Amino acid sequence: MISKFIFNNQYILNELPQCDKDLLEKVMQSKKYVKNQTVFTEGTLPTGIFYIETGKIKKYKVDNDGREQIIYIYNSGEFFGYSAILSEEAYGDTAVVIENSVISFISKEDFFNLLNNSVVFSRLLLKSLSHEFSVMANLMAVLSQRTVRERVALSLLILHDKYRVSGSEKNVSIMLSRTDLANMSGTVTETLARVLHDFKHEDLIWTEGRKIQLLNFQRLTQIANFY
């Protein structure tokens, strides 16, 4: 199932009791971010956690050759940056805005205060951490064992889920840059361009500029080979 490759925690805020939600919203400090602005950098110490009100964030690591490997795309309604706080370690990755966004910051003190006073929040966060670890393991297996064609197909299916609105499957436009899509698929832009050209020729996708729409989910799912 595609779900084992898609990380999200939008359910956290939705499932909080109203009293906990009110407490959380009181301590959120909203800030506007522009495209390509860094939220935090690998190796720096965390001072709080983040919640995306609107927009999207990419989380990535840099390999020994200086290339990005995108791990997740975070969407509006998701928390991120809390694993470093909980482990009391520096950030193990970098988070950068991929479209203009509004992000709320919750300080370390306020975050732990809520954790200590909300059993539900603690349980939901533990669930999210477990899911994140599982998705990470699945994605790493794909990157090491699958062909570029399989990886690109899977990345497109994951991104389709991230870019759709209100659960609609129709007219979903993926607006990720070709460089980011290549980094997410574990390849270089030249190879990605060839794969996308083939997919377009096979009527699996439609493209215009950086915009991509998926046309044949069944065939892309077969190519991704994640059964």
Image (cartoon, rainbow, N blue to C red):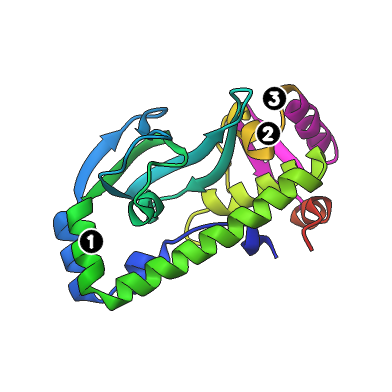
Identified by mark 2, the residue type is Thr
- SS for dot 1: helix
Identified by mark 3, the residue type is Thr
In the displayed structure, would residue 190 be above or below residue 20?
above
Residue underneath mark 3: 189
The residue that appears at 64% across and 56% down in the rendered structure is 137
Relative to the observer, which residue lies in front, 131 or 179?
A: 131
Q: CA distance from mark 3 to mark 1?
A: 42 Å
Q: Are marks 3 and 1 in contact (CB under 8 Å)?
A: no
Residue underneath mark 2: 207
Magenta segment, which residues?
Answer: 191-216
Q: Is residue 124 left or right of residue 130?
A: left
User: Which of the 4 quarters of the picture holds residue 117?
Assistant: bottom left
Q: CA distance from mark 1 to mark 2?
A: 45 Å
Q: Are marks 2 and 3 in contact (CB under 8 Å)?
A: no
Q: Is residue 170 magenta?
A: no
- SS for dot 2: strand
Mark 2 surroundings: few (<14), some (14-19) or many (≥20) residues within 10 A: some
Residue underneath mark 1: 112
The residue that appears at 53% across and 51% down in the rendered structure is 162
**Pointer 1 or 2: first along the chain:** 1
Q: Position of residue 217 (x, y in %)?
A: 74, 55
